[in-house]
Each structure stands twice: as C-alpha cells, then as structure tokens.
Amino acid sequence: MNNPTHDTHWLYTISPKRSAINLNFKEIWQYRDLLTLFVKRDVITAYKQTVLGPLWYLIQPLFTSITFTIIFNNLAGIDTGTVPPFLFNLAGITIWNYFTSCLTGTSNTFGANASIFGKVYFPRIITPLSLVISNLLKFGIQLLIFIVFYLYFYFQGAAISLNGFILLFPVVVVLMGTLGLGFGMIISSMVTKYRDLNYLVGFGVQLLMYISAVVYPMALVEQKMPDFVWLVKYNPLAYIIETTRYMVLNIGALPYWGLVYTFIITVAVFFMGLLLFNKTEKSFIDTV
C-alpha cells in the first residue's frame, strides 16, 4: 500500500545563509507578541525594586536642567534670548535623553541576552527594537513634564510659542531613536570582542552631549568659537536638538540642509549597524 504524499508547509525557515543586511518585517510581525513581552519586561523591571519607581523619569531631567541652568546660564553667562534658560535646557535634555537611553540600552544587547540567544531562536533584532520602543514611554513622561513647564512659563508671559513645523515633531523623534538604535547595534557588535567599549560608552556619551548643542544654541558656537564649530556642525545630533527647540520654542532657525545631512547619516548608521548586528549574531556565542 502506497503512503499518500503530503505537501509540507513550514511556518518558519531558519537558515544561516541570509543577506548581510536583513530586516525581515514579516518575521518581526510574526514575533510581535514576543516584542510586546520584551517591551513590558524592559518597562517593569527597570524600576521594579526602586522606591520612587517611574518618578526617576521625572527627577533626572529636572535636576539636570536646574544644574545646567545654574552652571551654564548663570555662571558661564550663556544667553538663551527670550526663552527662559531652564525651559531651553529642558527642551534639549528631553530629546537628548531619548537618544542616550536607546544607545546605552542597545549597546550591550549580545552580552545582556546571551543566555536567551543561546537557547531559543527568534529574530535577534527584536531585542534592541524593544528597548527603543520601551524608551518611548520614558520619553513620553519627560515630554509631559516639559509641557507642564512650558505652559507655566507661557502663562507667566515668556516669549515662547510653537512653530508650524511642530507637526513634524514625530519625525524628529524617529530620527533620534533610529540614530540611537544604529549606534547601539554597532557598539553591541563590537563589544563581543572588545569589552573595553562597555566602559567607554557612558563616558563617551557624556562628552558627546557637550558637542551636540544640548545646553547652548549652535549660533553661539559660530560666534564665540569659530575654530571649533566643525565639531558641532558635523554632529547630526546637534541638528536634531536645534530643530526640536525651533519647533517647540520658536527660537533660532530651521537647519534645512542640516536635517538632510542628519537623515543621510541616520540611514547610513542604521544600515551599518544592521549589517554588523546580523554578522555578529551568527558567531557571537563563541566570544561572549
């Protein structure tokens, strides 16, 4: 008796032979439940055993803004024009914190998840993606705090107003998150071989902040330090922060070409990070 022939339909095909730059949206969508679980994990475990919990999301930007206002505006005399210095600093710090959270959170993806990666298959890109998405919650809370202080200063008579380009604010947030994800994947891929990078990330991020126009307008660097202005002008983060303040405070000018440059750099960094990430995930377990 002949056995009937049945066609075999596989739900998933796992193969080591994939393109160097692989971002399988269909597969990511199939694992969307796992992505949701990772997002919940990142949000809940971050402050699960802390006393203040999510209040740390509020404390950090407020105290940082107060410190920067005292040091850079009161002592160093950095002029923010008609915008209250505290609000000027809070706007830059709020968007900057989203970048640093994405970068530092994804920079040790392989080391932090080696035990999971070594036991079960799922698209590895889900892990850094979950951090970028979960950090949106933190960013949203800090943005609400900014709105509260914005309304306070507005009704106090401060010369601030929203710009018409505020409708493009989500695009700026996506650029910031994608840039942080791209750099994070690059660093995470290199950390598997060069562990010293773990110690350099925090220090490097602090230095990067000072050349990203977080606590000063870009025009001030052109005016007072023309020999070093290239450090800021070639930094895509500076254009994102400058654009954010232009949108929410209507101060300065919209850096059109700077945004084009930022978009190109963001796309290049993301795909470079994806290339290294996909290459590293095949053999990282031998070096971690």
Image: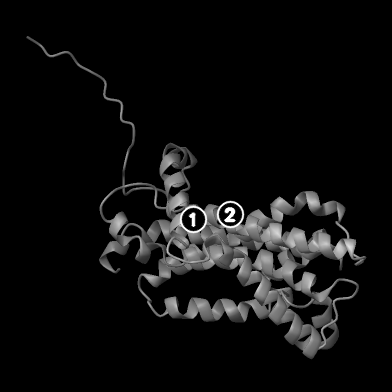
Residue 82 marker? none
Tell me the amino acid under the disc marked 1. Val
Residue 286, by quadrant, is bottom left
Q: Residue at x 89, y 61 (%)?
A: 155
Q: Is residue 119 left or right of residue 60?
A: left
Q: Is residue 206 visible?
A: yes
Query: From what the image shows, is residue 4 above or below residue 174?
Result: above
**Which residue in the structure is indicated by mark 1?**
43
Q: CA distance from mark 1 to mark 2?
A: 8 Å
* Residue placed furthest toward the bottom: 75
Q: Nearer the viewer, residue 256 or 197?
A: 197
Looking at the image, is mark 1 or mark 2 earlier in the sequence? Answer: 1
Callout 1: 10 Å neighbours few (<14), some, many (20+)? Answer: some
Q: Position of residue 20 (x, y in %)?
A: 43, 53
Q: Using the rendered view, name the quadrant where residue 83 is placed.
A: bottom right
Residue located beneath label 2 in the image: 137
**Residue drawn 70% across the image and 75% down it:** 65
6 vs 158, nearest the viewer: 158
Residue extending farthest to the front is 51
Q: Residue 104, percent across and down?
A: 50, 68
* Left or right: 32 in relation to 175: left
Look at the picture and state if 201 lies above or below 137: below
